[in-house]
Amino acid sequence: MSEPLILRVSRWAREIPDAPAYTFLDYADSADGTERTLSWSRVDLRARALAVRLREVALPGERAAILAPQGLEYVVAMLGAMYARVIAVPLFAPDLPGHADRLIRAYADADPVCVLTTTSALESVRTFIDGRSVPRPKAVLTLDTVSDLLADEWEPEPIGPGDLAYLQYTSGSTRAPAGVEISHGNVTANAEQLWRAFRATPRVSTAALWLPLFHDMGLIATIAAPIVGGNRAVFMDPVAFVMHPVRWLRMLSAYDDVFTGGPNFAYEYTASRVTEAEKAALDLSGVAVMLNGAEPLRGSTINRFSEEFAACGLRPEAHTPGYGLAEATVFVTAMDRDLPVRVTAFDRDALTAGRAVPVTGPDAGRGRVSELVSCGVPTGQDVAVVSPYGRAVPDGEVGEIWVRGPNVARAYWRDEERSAEVFGNELEGEEGTWLRTGDLGVIHDGELYVTGRIKDLVIVDGRNHYPQDVEVTVQEADEAVRRDHVAAFAVPGEETERLVVVAERSRRAEGRDPREVAANVRAAVARNHDLRVHEFALVEAGAVPRTSSGKIARRACAQAYLDGAFTTAAEGSRA
């Protein structure tokens, strides 16, 4: 096992003290963004100072919740907690819109003894603590007021690979947020795996991202992985990206060897929003890796993005589809950084029956096929596709994805029953325990393809249907449907489950008869899937719920539907 990742921060502080470590592009007061940078020596000093302050209010193994906005203070909070052997709980400031319920649940579950925030967010944090039925912390520390002089008082302590580094709360796509226990050994292993998979160059490659630091991909790619090789990380607030996605590409254009990533919807969103005039000023020739790491991956999105920015120097091979989950720290598999994206058309009927049968020739691009994007191969860990009986299935057969490696967490926080169910599985003929991911997949030509989540399957008349396939059919059935803002799910029926589709309206929906849109959707779903849509609802933009990582929250959408949330706003029809 390598030395704990946090110890390399002090190493870089000694070897390259003045080299930039973390740069935050602040768009709060400047449309062009103001660079705020911490060198390796500076980030080490501030982290040690915070560790001393933390130890005044928390013991090793106690929790410190980070309720701070995106920025350099957040980085210091994570590293300072690691130095102090206090378990960090990376969350977000209470004024982040749309995630109040998730924050309450995660905070209450973690039961922190102290809160780390900033002066700017202090009022909202106090309101949150005073106005909610949540545990009261012993102390609330403002990160930007901790004296640097405290760093001289820090005395290093042994940090074991089994010591907990932080609790990573899941995005809640299928259930309430759960705290994954990430040890120092886990974060060290996964940062190294990601760094090796990207074939980064020490002290040269730059990580440039906008992902939220409280999310698993944002935390590992932005804070952890650059520590492996003393690389620089440049990042911005997600809101700055959403307001003007060209900012992301401008950030990438500033570096000759740059790594980035985001969920599939970010590539679709950026391709549709960046203007030709903005493209003229971009140089994306230095982009080595653009990780696409959130389901579902769309080959059409990747192709569109490549075409839109080819004139900006973007190499098609830069696109790097991958797969991961919080229970494995985050990173599991990815395509090789220099291989082109592989999109394979599989026979849809065979796939729903559990077999991956490629369709080639003229039929590959149309009809009853499912186009899946390869997520590549694992780095430094094992992946198996497993039957419901705990046996690995042959290549070409669909099963549950299981993972084993030093990056796999040991448990969920304070949930022994669910921990045993998810983390303590034995694979026939193999030693050790495996993580059950809850995702379905198949190995084809040695590479992993993710087919969907077990709990999201739509089962009608005994046949399995993948909701993401239905969602693609719906969004292509009529231009009134907003792309990547569709949720397909099953609800109980008298004899079998019934398919319900909730879709946000696009800008082209104005003036359209919702009944005509519904008819087009029904016809397309019946033609491509042999499925009858029980109810179709066309709703306003923003109505379809998403997780914190941008995925469609199908189960939350189903619950909202059953609770009647779409009955007044919906314009659609029931069969």
Image (cartoon, helix red, strand yellow):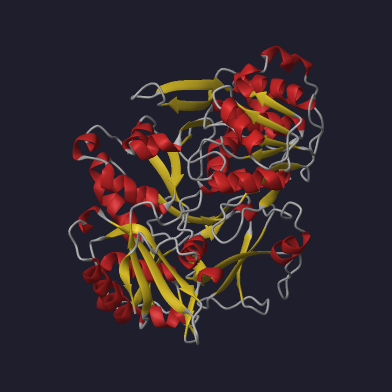
Q: Taking the image as drawn, is residue 285 in sight?
A: no
The image shows residue 538 at horizontal and vertical percentages of 32, 63
Residue 62's place in the image compared with 152, above or below, is: below
The image shows residue 378 at horizontal and vertical percentages of 57, 58
Q: Is residue 405 toward the left or the right of residue 20 in the image?
A: right
* Residue at figure coordinates x 40%, y 26% from the top left: 27
* Residue at figure coordinates x 49%, y 49% from the top left: 549
Label total for image: 0
The image shows residue 317 at horizontal and vertical percentages of 37, 51
Residue sitting nearer the eye, 93 or 90? 93
Residue sitting nearer the eye, 127 or 155? 127
* Residue at figure coordinates x 80%, y 24% from the top left: 56
Quadrant of residue 134 within the rendered picture: top right
Q: Quadrant of the N terminus?
A: top right
Q: Taking the image as drawn, is residue 325 in sight?
A: yes
Q: Is residue 521 toward the left or the right of residue 545 in the image?
A: left
Q: Is residue 256 toward the left or the right of residue 522 in the image?
A: right
Q: Quadrant of the C terminus?
A: bottom left
Quadrant of residue 571 within the rendered picture: bottom left
Quadrant of residue 81 within the rendered picture: top right
The image shows residue 301 at horizontal and vertical percentages of 33, 56
Q: Is residue 78 toward the left or the right of residue 348 in the image?
A: right
Residue sitting nearer the eye, 458 or 431? 458
